[in-house]
Amino acid sequence: MKSRTAVRMSDVAQAAGVALVTVSRVINEPDKVAPQTRAQVEAAVRKLGYVPDRTASSLASSRSRIVGAVVPTLANVWFAETMEGLAAELGRAGYQLMLAQSSYVPRAEAGLIDAFLGRRVDALVLTGALRDAAARTRLRQMHLPVVETWDLPARPVDMAVGFSNEEVGEEVARRLVKAGRRAIAFLGADEQRSQMRRAGLERGLQAAGLPLVAAEYVPPPSSIALGRELMARLAAAHPDVDAVFCGNDFIAIGAMMWARTNGWDLPGRLAVVGFSDLPIAEATWPPLTTVKVRGGEMGRRAGAMLLARLRGEEPPRKVEDIGFEYVERSTT
Amino acid sequence: MKSRTAVRMSDVAQAAGVALVTVSRVINEPDKVAPQTRAQVEAAVRKLGYVPDRTASSLASSRSRIVGAVVPTLANVWFAETMEGLAAELGRAGYQLMLAQSSYVPRAEAGLIDAFLGRRVDALVLTGALRDAAARTRLRQMHLPVVETWDLPARPVDMAVGFSNEEVGEEVARRLVKAGRRAIAFLGADEQRSQMRRAGLERGLQAAGLPLVAAEYVPPPSSIALGRELMARLAAAHPDVDAVFCGNDFIAIGAMMWARTNGWDLPGRLAVVGFSDLPIAEATWPPLTTVKVRGGEMGRRAGAMLLARLRGEEPPRKVEDIGFEYVERSTT
DNA sequence: TTGAAAGCGCTAACAT
DNA sequence: ATGTTAGCGCTTTCAA
């Protein structure tokens, strides 16, 4: 089906009356060609509507100008924003983004990475720390630029930009305890980074001599409806709970809805803290206290780190802590 | 930097004691190889950790197994969901998704499409009807499978899956008029499909003998904050307005916030209708009446249509109307 | 500054 | 069922 009539570099060369290599140079290293020759070639390119076949150039140069990224899912704004920032950054340098979703299945990741390697991607962006040991060593051996995001692995495959999910939990614990809460629970998705936040919360509470009253989970992806369910379960098992830290804002909003429906006053009877600061967190009633993470910025930084590497430079830092911000609104 | 030590097909062939083509067959058409030979080859593949170079196979076969998609931005859930569905569908058939963002700049689209063509993508997914005439004819001449989404172009480039943005507007007009509203306005982003919804609203009002009281715009991307601003502008210019149709749910939520702040009772004094049904639309207070569009399903259908085409089949329909649903909640 | 020749790693006919 | 021979459209030496 592919038109055999595609214009090739040799066609352009012929039309411009130069050798094929010269056309290649005009495209890749224009300065190395005499202005006049270049003009001829450029004219021919325009006239014929030539679009270089990057599939061929990838093979010949073994540089694809493609960056592969693995996310659990695109349907979650926070990862989508990271990809938005990443794609924007990469696009400015002529790199393309190739995307794959692990659907929160940890073992799927290695396979997706393999597919990317088969595409000869120039670099890789991962969500969270890469678990698969074989894949880790493989990537390291290849010296492929890799950025892990949304986490701060102790020993990154290569580079990382993220924040400490544990610290998020600890900070929330400190805030809630300081606000006088004593029966604190966790509601979240049963997924790696969410668990890290729970662990942090637990540790923070321990430091204050408090137990984690309960932790309820749903399999990802989470939703408002699941948040409501989790809260219902929690309230049934622990009617004395006075604060919940939710793995993300959807769950938090679900918990808030349950509270409203069941006459639990917010924040009087129950404090709710979310995570990720969705745009609507400030529009809920009452406005939701949550932890803000700059997802888009994470993507942009990841892109910048990769581009530096691809230019042959060493990025200033191999691990960037982008931090997080506890945004106190009215549910605490 | 790329390791010259990459395992090639010839290495596998040698290790398995067969010809190179045989390895290729084991990978691409396993049934055409004797079970025993196949086993040998597969063993060698595993032993050497061979990953086929798809960049080379793309060049040789002129099929890349890549689908390119252009979205205005990934940061908007609705497009992200479409991409999620698309990637999921394509992934199951071994196709990869390559993504590019037009950032709502209409003229950027043609360039992004060119970049994809240079990558020799096997198919293309676009958001909205493709405006650029040159690009349209070019794609048609190439017989490249193309799906336009989020709209129902009268003359699609190739295939389409979406809904009529005008009809959405008309339906909202009918509902609001029926509910007794008489001073109806539109708030939206200054972007193609949003304008189509406004046009539909206007036409629907005309049919009822009513004028569109006002239409206020902001440049995309829109946000809750911008929605609030728009509503402020509208209220200042037309204090008598009794209903607003918003180009999307963020704007609608912004309008609601303005109303709450300024003591406009919802839906008594003002009716608000959103568009796209964000997950939080049902969690606002009062729950937001909006128009629901199944973004993920659109992506899945687009993927299915493309895959059919790529298999050489003709999809049952070239244009699929996925419809929309007016979800009446409590702001009307 | 420009060009000629030799691949990049695979698939597509065509044998055998 | 398996193998042989030519490329796919570029980039990369190296030479002029």
Image (spheres, coloured by chain):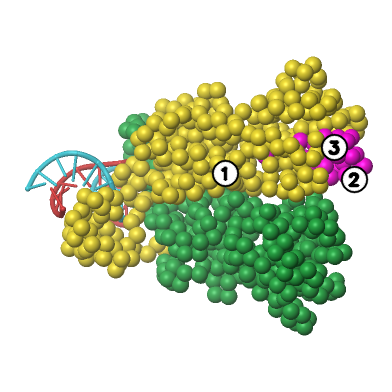
Chain colours: A green, B yellow, C cyan, D red
Report if residue A66 lies within the magenta region: no
Q: Amino acid at mark 1?
A: Gly
Task: Give how far across and how far down residue B50 sits, in percent.
Answer: 32, 62
Dot placed on the residue nearer the N-terminal end, 3 or 1: 3
Q: Secondary structure at mark 2?
A: helix
Q: Which residue is mark 2?
A: B261
**In the rendered structure, are the residues bearing label 2 and label 3 in contact, judged by CB atoms less than 8 Å apart?**
no
The residue stretch that appears in magenta:
B251-276
Task: Give how far across and how far down residue A229 sits, in percent.
Answer: 69, 59
Q: Which residue is mark 3?
A: B267
Q: Is residue A287 left or right of residue D16?
A: right
Q: Amino acid at mark 3?
A: Pro
Query: Toward the viewer: B145 or A283?
Result: A283
Task: Give how far across and how far down residue A11 sits, in percent.
Answer: 34, 34
Q: Residue at x 90, y 29 (%)?
A: B240
Q: Is residue A281 left or right of residue A159?
A: right
Q: Can residue B56 be seen? A: yes
Give the letter of the chain under mark 3. B
Query: Toward the viewer: B256 or A87?
Result: B256
Q: Residue at x 51, y 61 (%)?
A: A105
Q: Residue A171, located in which quarter of the rendered image?
A: bottom right
Q: Is residue D10 above or below residue A214?
A: above
Q: Is residue A170 left or right of residue D11?
A: right
Q: Which residue is mark 1?
A: B296
Q: How far apart, in angstroms, are the residues tagged by discs 2 and 3?
A: 14 Å
Report if residue B258 lies within the magenta region: yes
